[in-house]
Amino acid sequence: MSPFLLLKNVNKIFPIHRNLFSFFSKSNHIRKVIDNVSLEVGAGEVMVLAGESGSGKTTLAKLIMGSLTPDSGTIYFEGNDVQVLKKKKKFYSLIQMIHQDPYSSLNPHLKVKDIVMEPLKIHDRGSSSKEEKIEQVRIALRRTKLEPVDEFLDKYPTMLSGGQRQRVSIARAIVKIPKLIIADEPVSMLDISVRAEILSLLNDLRKSLNISIIYITHDLATSRFIGDKIGIMFAGNIVEYGDIDEVLHNPLHPYTWMLLDAVTFASTESKFYKTFSGSNTSAAALPLKGCKFYNRCKLSFADCTQDIQQFNINKKHAVSCFYYKNVVTNLN
Ligand SMILES: Nc1ncnc2c1ncn2[C@@H]1O[C@H](COP(=O)(O)OP(=O)(O)O)[C@@H](O)[C@H]1O
Ligand SMILES: [Mg+2]
């Protein structure tokens, strides 16, 4: 049986217009924003994509949703190429997105009931009556704990708190039960006090409705609540990948160490990595060949300028770092 979601060597290139001169010159710079990404998500599984701003997380989400086209590589959704599937309208009801900002992602002029009903209006236009649609909206609001439901139906987004607005986004995403939800930093703009509630709501929903989730975050601390698997992204590469407990308990890539340090998972060993410099994946600062983390890594050595390879530490854990080449060779 084919996996639920499979990405095979996916690449996406964007042009960079550095200045007016390079804009008009033919030799416009290009940048691989997604660089040879392969990963697999099972049905009902939660895959965390973690990495700093600019690492390509949102671009990868757009590729999976079919709103961007890969320059090479293929994305398979239940065994079928997304580029083919997206020609059918039905595909768009199978994947739903929850955005970071619950203030700008909801139309302020629509009532909660109309916002949540939107996917039904698009996809079930003729197949169900207005009353049936309202009933589905009620069920979705109940599932997202916006109760008593009657109090929320006629409210406008401006009358709701950030956490309630994000629940409305979730209700809209599940009203026509999708197979996959891509949640792009869904709690990063919310008060810390409500973040855990929203994450546990997403977790409950995926269990009760068997929805897979891709949970995008730059914060590893919250990812443990929800993830089964994790992919650590750096400059368009997945540098470390595997079972979330395995990766977070035994992080191998120096960049993963750095991310963990940033969220105070710090152990004494990780202090070794504290002197990494720089914090932004700016295109100019990246090495042109080999491991893109090379310039920032204390462990780098001659091999790191070669084309990057992925080493499978075990069945549940892979890392793209030459430092582990010998470790893996010794294991085999
Ligand atoms: N449409 C676009 N055209 C050109 N560059 C883009 C476009 N969208 C994103 N980028 C660039 O791609 C890189 C990755 O962006 P993004 O996927 O939004 O990262 P993240 O979500 O991890 O912050 C960034 O350097 C961003 O500037
Ligand atoms: Mg983003």
Image (cartoon, rainbow, N blue to C red):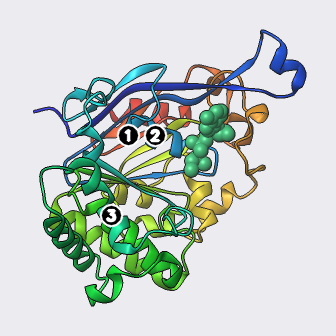
Whole-Å distance between the Cαs marked 3 and 1?
A: 17 Å
**Quarter of image, res 261:** bottom right
Say which residue label 2 marks.
62
**Quarter of image, res 15:** top right
Say which residue label 3 marks.
172
Identify the amino acid type marked 3.
Arg
**The residue tagged with tag 1: helix, strand or loop?**
helix
**The residue tagged with tag 2: helix, strand or loop?**
helix
Of callouts 3 and 1, the N-terminal one: 1
Quadrant occupied by the N terminus: top left
**Residue 303 seen anywhere in this rendered image of the structure:** yes
Q: For label 2, count other residues whose C-alpha is less than 10 Å away and answer few (under 14), some (14-19) or many (20+).
A: some
In this rendering, which labeled residue sits more in front, label 3 or label 1?
Answer: 3
Label 2 C-beta lies within 8 Å of the nearest ligand 1 atom: yes
**Quarter of image, res 322:** top right
Residue 53 position within the rendered picture, expressed as x and y whole percent measured from the top left: 63, 51
Residue 73 position within the rendered picture, expressed as x and y whole percent measured from the top left: 40, 21
Identify the amino acid type marked 2.
Lys
Q: Is residue 288 left or right of residue 267?
A: right
Residue toward you, 240 or 33: 33
Whole-Å distance between the Cαs marked 2 and 1?
A: 5 Å
Q: Residue at x 36, y 56 (%)?
A: 244
Label of residue 241 in the image: none
**Residue 212 seen anywhere in this rendered image of the structure:** no
Identify the amino acid type marked 1.
Met
Say which residue label 1 marks.
65
Q: Residue at x 46, y 78 (%)?
A: 156
